[in-house]
Amino acid sequence: MTQTVPNTTTRTITATVNGEQVTAEVAVRTLLSDFLRHTCELTGTHVGCEQGVCGACTVLVDGEAVRSCLMLAVQVDGRTVETVESLAEEGELSTFQAAMKSHHGLQCGFCTPGILMSVAAERRGDPVERVEGEVLGGHICRCTGYAGIRAAIRETWSKGAQA
Amino acid sequence: MTVTTGASVDGEPRPEGSLIGARVHRVQDDRLLRGNGRYVDDLSDTGTLHAAVVRSGTASGEVTGFDASAALALDGVHLVLGPAELASQLRPVPHPWLIPGQQVTEVPLADTTIRYVGQPLAVVVATSRAVAEDAAELVEIEVKERDAVVGIAAARAADAPLVYPELGTNKVGAIHFGDPAEELEAVFATAALVVDHEFEVPRVGHNSLEPRGIVAEYIPATDRLEIVSSTQVPHLIRQEVAHALGMRVDRVRVVAPDVGGAFGQKTSLFPDEAMVCAAARALGRRVKWIEDRSESMVAAYQGRGQRTRGRLALDADGRFLALHLDIHGDLGAFPSTGTGGAGPFQVSGLMIEGPYRFERAASTITAWYTNAVPTGAFRGYGMQESCFVRERLVDMAARRLGVDPVELRRKNMLGPADLPFVTRTQMPYDNGDYPAALNGAARYGKERARPSEGRIRRGIGYASMTEITGYAPTALQEMFGIHWSTYDSTRIRVNEDGTVTVHSGITGIGQGIETSLAQIAAERLGVPMEWISVDLGDTAVSPYSNMASQASRGLPVGGGALWRAADRLRLRMRGLAASYLKADPESITFEDGTFRAPDGSSVSWREIAHRGWMGWGRDPEGPIALEELEEFDPPSITYGYATHGAQVAVDLDTGKVTVEDYWLSHDAGVVVNPLIAEGQMVGGVAMGIGAALLEQVAYSPYGQPITATYLDYLLPLSEDVPDVAQEHLETPSELIPGGFKGLGESGIIPPPAAIANAVAAAVPEIADRLTALPMSPSAVWTLLDEAGLTR
């Protein structure tokens, strides 16, 4: 058997994470999700499957929703990353966060940050095309049955609010 | 149809502005929405080593060689423990509920005999998870493979390979509940109508979005093991860890932080978790292991897994004469501990009758070893499986008799005057109005019919059920030789600044019990909810609870205990105020945080709390500490019940079933928080829709899991789950202070039956063949094709 030699090559990256410039040396194989959670200590981004299916790890990179478990940290060099920790503005829950609370759109809360980020990405899209089921299409929630989440999305969009 | 009837509590009308029945927002939501959850993997990694688990890639065999030298040579690797070392360090854990005949009464946590793919064989500990995984790949294990046994049919075959050759059989054991078999056979031989079918409910996975995870820290100086675990049952984990590691229970502490879903899976110590504890002790360090999804899908215990022959006998008038379920359960490689093993199969058998009267009823349950990961507790705990069989048989019988299935149910259903009632399998039903739930759902369903259009057929189906909640009393467990205790304890304390702390043995697993308990405490004390903290899930401070958050018992048992404890504490606070104000306690009023005497003098709650902590003004014979501990062991089981309705569309070209509309009428006693209650119901229904249409753990004939990712194992998405209309009937439980019944499992029980009955109504040509779950497009298309309905 050929002995595996772990890939320990590192690279220095600089990214803007939640408005702050972060420079760090990372192993090139580091996933963006691990970089955010363990290097940036932003543990609000959750890892549910590491297979790019469940959507819990969704963050925004240059405003687009991406699966942070399917992206390497080195890919965000020079780019902007937003995580769930950025959503509450001046300490107040965003309109959608507050709607999730009032419509009981979360139970265990593990999938919630990813859903919050996908809905946040939608604010850059065309509001006419919005369908609440579609923005949820890439997310698995095992607790809520989705009804409360859809109600929260509908309420947020009916207010014309930013997510 | 969200209707709340607003039942009285303790015979008194619910007061205006009561917190019982209020749609209070959950106390933890702000934190979770901001990304400030504290799940196991979110805790600080300072000083932490990381574990990776080496697992078997084959389903059956014997470890003949183990070489970790290459792994140990890797930079950053601290320790590798192989199967033989682990077996010497981990004692087998006794199984608490045996099925008669069960020979494997202890679960080996480490073994050199391989019985399933995913079985943990070694643990590697390194400075980082990445290094630990690199090293795990370098561990070489030689295995002498044996033939595997996959599935119940294979396990039962005469020439089957044996999971335990020394036992001479794959049969774990068997039990019969209810009327004697010969009495049933006499009825089946002479009844006007007998409906007789084979049913299959496959293995399914819990798939909490947070997989399992554990951080174990051993402190040599004090011989203490501190564990943080994503678990439903911290006290049980402590017992099992102490036993496995041969430690004193008082040296082990288990904390459950935020838990990202559980659904019955996180109810016992798993072998890989025990190995992490052994590694922490060997190193005198803190070791973290976070299960990844691939591991979860092959090595975390699963649920269901039953093949059942169901027979229902009726007379010519449609009266239920006899019901028999011959249940065969897929136990897997060994009986899972905690509330697992053959327990769910047995509860399937005990709960066959649902809300109906049968002249005779019985179940025969047989459990089988197979070369697959063990099955265990899964939300609904066996009740979904037998509900599916019974409610399908009822529907088939109605079709054969040419009567409305709702009418047939109504005719045979126990009425409110029949309760309390003991079933043929000796389940003591308490109170309620079962037909009210049936009628409520049927009434709503009348307006929900939608016509078929072209190749899309539509239909409506119903399913009714009864459900064990607040499982008790503990003496019954002793009588039946089940090593569980079912009581729970809650401590409530007024702190020196007047704030209130509640400690319960119940744990938070995402269901929202913290909020419901805070509502109860605030309501009974008469103080604002904001003054209440509910601290759960730490064996160092939480009162003992063996079962903790499972079996729909959090609110009835934990909440019931809190109800009484808070009432006592309220009276003590009032007594202290009366002593201070020199007035008769009965004359003292309490409003807006202030005690007032008839003469107009007053004192604040906070001042009385302070005086209480100083020990001033108390009854010299009475207690000092401003806290009350209530131990509550319900005198009997309190039962929830429901009828669900589903309207489905069946695409004759693709076999795809879509649940277009769903509604239910249920009774969970007094509802503390309708927002949370409805969330539990919808979440349960969603999981039930998954079981009905999508979910199935599959193995190759060699025992290889072939549903090991979310691309192979389909979970319900938003598009699969409609909004759910709900009617809450509220018959207060007479067994539980506060009148609560549990509802965490209620929603998941009827959906497969209701949806199958709806498909049968939509496509009567295949009605009698809808006997297996999931009703996936390919399965349904095959039935449609065989019925000549495809093109």
Image (cartoon, coloured by chain):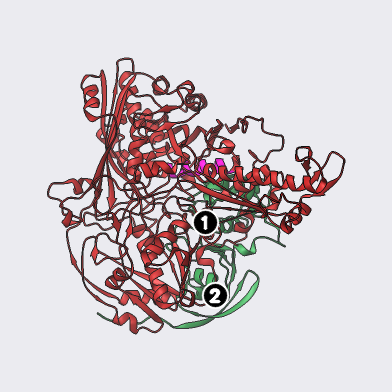
Chain colours: A green, B red
Residues B494 and B256: in front is B494
Residues B136 and B742: in front is B742
Q: Quick one: which residue is furthest to the front in this view?
A: B621
Query: Few, some or many C-alpha atoms within 10 Å of disc 1 (few <14, some 14-19, many ≥20)?
Result: many
Looking at the picture, how far across and down is residue A38, in whole percent?
53, 72
Q: Earlier in the sequence, mark 1 or mark 2?
A: 2
Q: Amino acid at mark 1?
A: Cys
Magenta-colored stretch includes residue A111: no
Question: Please, is residue B609 above or below residue B426 in the view?
Answer: below
Residues B694 and B563: in front is B563
Prevailing secondary structure class for the magenta stretch in the rendered image: helix
Q: Amino acid at mark 2?
A: Thr
- Judged left or right of residue B553, residue A88 is right
C-alpha separation, residue under disc 1 versus residue under disc 2: 21 Å
- Judged left or right of residue B149, residue B580 is right
Label 1 residue SS: loop
Looking at the picture, how far across and down is residue B393, in whole percent?
32, 29
| Quadrant containing the N terminus of chain B in the rendered view | top right
Which stretch is magenta?
B676-689
Label 2 residue SS: helix
Let me know if residue B76 appears in the view: yes
